[in-house]
Image (spheres, grey):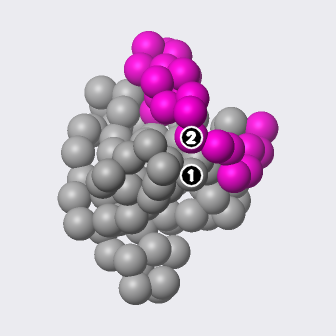
Amino acid sequence: MVDAAVDRQAADVLLMDVARVSSFADYFVIVTCLNARHMNAVGDAMEKVADAASLPALHREGTPDSGWVLLDFGDIIAHLFTAPMRERYALEQLWQAAPTVVRVQ
């Protein structure tokens, strides 16, 4: 999913291992998208990769027009943000106890 986001030009792609600090997921993928259209493209690419790995999306929340979309793949949760919404929600700070697996800026 990280590769799919990077391939679609998402910015500041972060994979966090939240397994030790969360009971509902093992990993968060957090990405910054330029706009709603870009967010759709990144989300679609991530869903395609996950589906090919037998991890179909269980739930989708938010809308690209709101600046935030959550894709729930069970053990992996992807957060797609516009830059202002990513700063507002500050998930990296909220989950700072979770180790970073990879970050592509």
Residue 4 coordinates in the image, percent (x, y): 61, 63
Question: Which quadrant, please, contains the C terminus?
Answer: top right
Q: Is residue 54 left or right of residue 13?
A: left
Residue 47 coordinates in the image, percent (x, y): 42, 67
Residue drawn at x 49%, y 31% is 95
Q: Amino acid at mark 2?
A: Ala
- Tell me which corner region of the image, top left, top right, bottom left or bottom right, holds residue 2: bottom right
Disc 1 to disc 2, how far (Cα)? Answer: 6 Å
- Answer above or below: position of 54 versus 88: below
Residue 73 coordinates in the image, percent (x, y): 35, 65
Question: Which quadrant, please, contains the N terminus?
Answer: bottom right
Residue 42 coordinates in the image, percent (x, y): 51, 53
- The region drawn magenta spans 81-105
Badge 1 vs badge 2, beta-carbon distance below 8 Å: yes
In primary-sequence order, the first of circles 1 and 2 is 1
Q: Is residue 58 left or right of residue 7?
A: left
Residue tagged by mark 1?
17
Q: Is residue 72 visible from the viewing direction of this image?
A: yes
On whether residue 96 falls in the magenta region, the answer is yes
Residue drawn at x 34%, y 41% is 69
Dot 1 falls on a residue whose secondary structure is strand
On whether residue 85 falls in the magenta region, the answer is yes
Q: Amino acid at mark 1?
A: Asp
Instruction: Please name whichever residue, 97 or 33, is drawn nearer the observer in this view of the structure.
Output: 97
> Which dot marks residue 95?
none
Instruction: Please name whichever residue, 52 or 7, is drawn nearer the observer in this view of the structure.
Output: 52
Residue tagged by mark 2?
98
- Answer above or below: position of 98 versus 49: above
Residue drawn at x 67%, y 63% is 3
Instruction: Please name whichever residue, 97 or 54, is drawn nearer the observer in this view of the structure.
Output: 97
